[in-house]
Amino acid sequence: MFQSLKCIGILTSGGDAPGMNAAIRAVTRTAIYNDIEVKGIYRGFKGLITGEIEPFKTNSVSNIIQRGGTILKSARCEEFLDPEGRKIAYDNLVKHGIDALVVIGGDGTLTGAAVFAREYNIPVVGLPGTIDNDLSGTDVTIGYNTALNTIVEAVDKIRDTASSHERLFFIEVMGRNCGALALNSAIAAGAEAAIIPEISIEKDQLHEFISQGFRKSKNSSLVLVAESEITGGALLLAERVKSQYPQYDVRVAILGHLQRGGSPTAQDRILASRMGYAAIQALLESQRNIMVGVRNEEIVYVPFSQAIKKEKPINPDLVKILNVLST
Ligand code: F6P
């Protein structure tokens, strides 16, 4: 048991993800169940610096499991990149009697948390909260499943107009540099192709798709494009089609931030609840500077160094399945 674990601070940082509230609830209630005080830190690391910190009770997290976004708000905090900013943050932790932190966010959040933990020797546990599913060390991140379902619902709707007008649609989805959302939503929506950064370096996916005769016997085509400098994004691909293959009637839909909103799916709520519970168990077991992950349905603790700044390879079987099923 971690001797001085009397009070934890919790924050969400970076892009919000559906299920973050369920994670905040799980962390808060598991901590209180174990007689640990909880302080909510608002606006991510920014709130640590500005001192926007307040006690959380059991009912502070009532009626939030079903809500998207994050009740703690989120921010991308430049000042925290600076050692002086982190010193102020540390002083605020001490002032508020916080002796461990639970941070919920993506790669940037966990990178900041790892630096802070090392610098000030504070126990920190991270939860992977991002729609991108780009963190290695966990099969899935909080928010990914909801975003995937949101995308599929949108693509189903675009299909109606695409097929009515016999058009080629490029639908751009988020993911930073990760093709997981694009590839899996393409399979789930029965799209013709996915153009993803993990493959773009190896080959010209647009050329391949067109040269294989994308229309075949179909009267429309849907191509999911992962946002990324590597793929060039949907607008660039559409421009290429217009100039190189003018016979095609092409349109673009960029789904944007609607992918981050909405009520979390049951799967995300359960994942967030399991991970939030595990974060407190980890601290009680004196684990520190780890991210909670899930591998093959089991909770795992992954050192920050293995969770961040690493490539998360895509499953080549999924690429093959998409190719075969779209013939
Ligand atoms: O990391 C989550 C994410 O939604 C990415 O998919 C996207 O590239 C980025 O955040 C967008 O960030 P912002 O909301 O700051 O524009």
Image: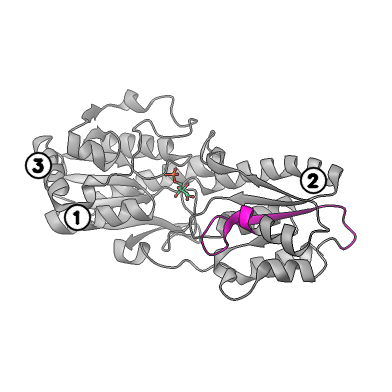
Above or below residue 194? Residue 189 is above
**Would you say 130 lies left or right of 24 here?**
right
Q: Which residue is mark 1?
A: 117
Residue at the image position 41 percent from the left and 63 percent from the top:
137
Q: Secondary structure at mark 3?
A: helix
Amino acid tagged 2: Ala
Q: Quadrant of residue 12?
A: top left
Of marks 1 and 3, the one in the foreground: 3
What is the magenta range? 216-236
Rendering coords of residue 317 (x, y %):
65, 70
Q: Which residue is mark 3?
A: 91
Indicate which disc residue 292 carries: none
Among the two numbered marks 2 and 3 on one chain, the one whose residue lies closer to the N terminus: 3
2 vs 3, front mark: 2
Pick the front one: 135 or 212: 212
Dot 3: few (<14), some (14–19), or many (≥20) neighbours within 10 Å? some
